[in-house]
Image (cartoon, rainbow, N blue to C red):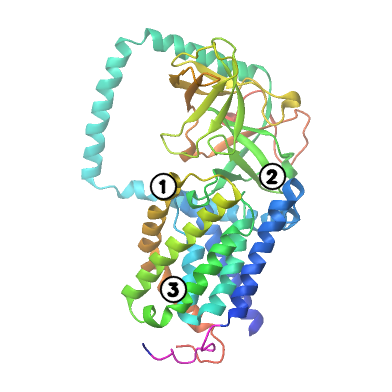
Amino acid sequence: MSVLRLSVLAALVTGAVVLQVAAFSYLSYDGVVPNLALLVVVAAALVRGPDFAATLGFFAGLAVDLAPPADHVAGRWALALVVVGYVAGRVRHDAGASALGAVVTVAASSFIGTSVFALSGMLLLDPAVPVAEALRVIPVSVGYDVLLTPLVLPLAMRLFRRIRPYEVAV
Amino acid sequence: MRATSPGSPHQRPSRTVLVLLLLACFTVVTLDVRGGDDSPVDPLRSAVGEVLGPIERGAAAAVRPVVAVPQFFRSTSGLRADVSRLEAENARLRGEVATSGVDRNRAAELDGLLAGARGTGYAVVPARVIAMGPAQSFTRSVTIDAGTSSGIEPDMTVLNNDGLVGRVIRADRTTATVLLVVDRQSVVGGRLGSTMEVGHLRGRGDHGDDARLDLDLVDQNAAPTRNDVLVTWGSRNGAPYVAGIPIGVVTTVSISPRQLSARAVIAPFVDFTSLDLVGVVVDPDTEGDRAVLNAGPAEESP
């Protein structure tokens, strides 16, 4: 069962990362695509809490960092998604109950995640992202993630509930 | 505050997990930054590329027909808007035709350059773009569906029938990653078509319709003129860029006494938002799992 759970998680993360670069590039707004990996991590945080979500965020972020055509320093998205998983997991008791709370959590997570990634790029000069471009991209990506929340988040949360251990599926 | 959701295995988050994960992130970042060109993360990167490359290729192939669907569902109002837009464009084009002498010369110049690029007999491997890096990652790169099995190596020139697209930065077995010339880290040697002056082109990181490149000319006195065509300057052994590939036209020129070189802004010929079929310039004797097109860019591909 545990192997099955792990493979479901791996398939979910891989699917999110692949769709993000291969399918949503056709629907990009100004080059920005919805950050599906981030939505999966937020869903995990709302269902399972910070520890699980931060760990999942690490592996999902590493997948985003290493999947072609990524060319930035590896570990930057991993860092961003670990932070997102932890923060979203901490607020889940307040946010997980209502739909509005979930949307606000996604918006905050998207803002935090993209900002952490941009800031790490500024620190490492990889590439030297100008603040103006970061400020242009971040709101668009927050908007796009929120737009996709009703489609992705309930599905992912239901999946995480089903594969939660020690419990009968709801 | 609400009670803990039932059945949640972790009542309170452990700091240890967070700290361990953060340390793991910093380790990966440090390894990759310190490693430079032969970073220890690279084998991992190519392993992931080997696995995800074919999946991305499958996803792109599955999505391509779906992308065409929305066109069937356009409302009449959208079509009407299209008609009025096209009529306006028609009128504008008619006006342009009236004064097209200069343009025709320019087009002839461009045709000559393109013919030159073809005439030099570069052999290209055709490939399709299967994935694009998101703008959130601040890198302008794409994945193509041909890799080392088709004879593609890093530092090869990538072009399409409009002009220069970029260069290969990493090649796995069945996929390769291409850094677009509009990326902020991309530097291309360029040559002005009219005066043969050389300079360096830097990307700005945009890749929409307003994508622009900045040109710094080596010779300060060589003032580029508007609508001058720029081609690649070329490097030794054709790596990373072969010579004579059209890049774009000069749109604005700025010369100030404070600057050491004349600067110009270039509009690239290639539309980076709708990249699909591209060609990778390879050695003509390359033996791979797909046909090498000798002389002529990828448009004649099957």
Q: Chain of mark 3?
A: A
Q: Establish whether labels 3 and 2 are both on one chain.
A: no
Task: Label 1, secondary structure: give it.
Answer: loop
Q: Establish whether labels 1 and 3 are both on one chain.
A: no
**Within-10-Å neighbours for mark 3: few <14, some 14–19, many 20+:** some
Q: Percent position (x, y) of residue A170? A: 44, 88
Q: Which of the two labelled residues, at mark 2 and mark 1, occupies the earlier sequence position?
A: 1
Asked whether A83 or B295 is in front, the reply is A83
> What residue is disc 1 on?
B68
> What residue is disc 3 on?
A155
Q: Please name the residue shown 42% across and 71% down the image.
A: A153
Task: Label 3, secondary structure: give it.
Answer: helix
Magenta stretch?
A: B3-13
Q: Please name the residue shown 50% across and 50% down the image.
A: B134
Q: Chain of mark 1?
A: B
Asked whether B199 or B276 is in front, the reply is B199
> What residue is disc 2 on?
B170
Residue that lies at the very extreme toward the front in this rendered image:
B258
Which three-letter amino acid code belongs to the residue tagged 2? Arg
